[in-house]
Image (tube, rainbow, N blue to C red):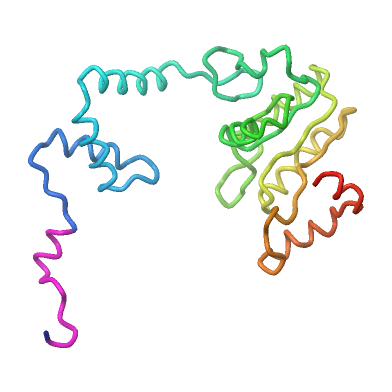
Amino acid sequence: MAEGALLFPPLQYSYLCTMIFSSALIENAVNEFAKLPGIGKKTALRLVLHLLKQETAQVEQFGDAIARMRQQIQFCKVCHNVSDAEVCSICSSHSRQKQVVCVVESIRDVMAIENTQQFNGLYHVLGGIISPIDGIGPDQLNIHSLVERVQHQGVEEVIMAVSPTIEGDTTIYYLSKKLRAFPVKITTIARGIAFGGELEYADEMTLARSISNRLPLESYVQNK
């Protein structure tokens, strides 16, 4: 083989990179699955072929569940979390601490915190964070409703569970200014070195926050 020659001729290489479908229905289904985040054409084809092996009733049940979810899902009028009703199951629960509200960026953050089973208060989903570069300002977020909750619903503590980024810190600063007029305690989640992490691989900001938020040794030992 001559130096620099392609392993495959251009025509064959192009053929390998292009999926050839014998059915337009299969091709359309693959293209729709491939629109999902993290799903490439090969994975999409594998999913479609899997569905093709299932009973018709099972595939119809799958499609119906997706369609019903999109058509009937609601957003809680209190906290803006996803819900099956006007008020989500968390806000309507009598066992939650209604005087504590955890402010998060997205619905996925609510799920992440709920999975820890360490928080028993309520949530408030901002729907994003302030990011002038992306054209996202305070008016595009669920900030006014948070102020209303603090003002009228007896909230005693607001926990800022927002990602530790420049945009996240900007959002926290803005919210703290908006809530300053009310007798409410404002806290943030602890930030620092992750458990099991190597100190030398930590970025400067994380290391600085870890030092600034240091705990007495007794407190650290008691939490072990």
Q: Where on the picture, by quarter, is residue 94?
A: top right
Point 13% across, 71% down: residue: 8
Foreground residue among 85 and 128: 85
Q: Please provide percent x and percent y for residue 10.
A: 12, 69
Q: Where on the picture, by quarter, is residue 37?
A: top left
Q: Please provide percent x and percent y for residue 23.
A: 9, 37
Give the side of residue 191 with respect to residue 106, left or right.
Answer: right
Q: Please provide percent x and percent y for residue 167.
A: 66, 49
Decide: is 209 above or below 97: below
Q: Which residues are magenta?
A: 2-16
Foreground residue among 222 and 24: 222
Decide: is 211 above or below 129: below
Foreground residue among 130 and 69: 69
Give the side of residue 12 with respect to residue 124, left or right.
Answer: left
- Answer whether residue 104 is magenta in the image: no
Q: Please provide percent x and percent y for residue 184.
A: 87, 29
Give the side of residue 47 with respect to residue 135, left or right.
Answer: left
Point 85% across, 25% down: residue: 156
Point 67% across, 59% down: residue: 197
**Quadrant including the N terminus:** bottom left
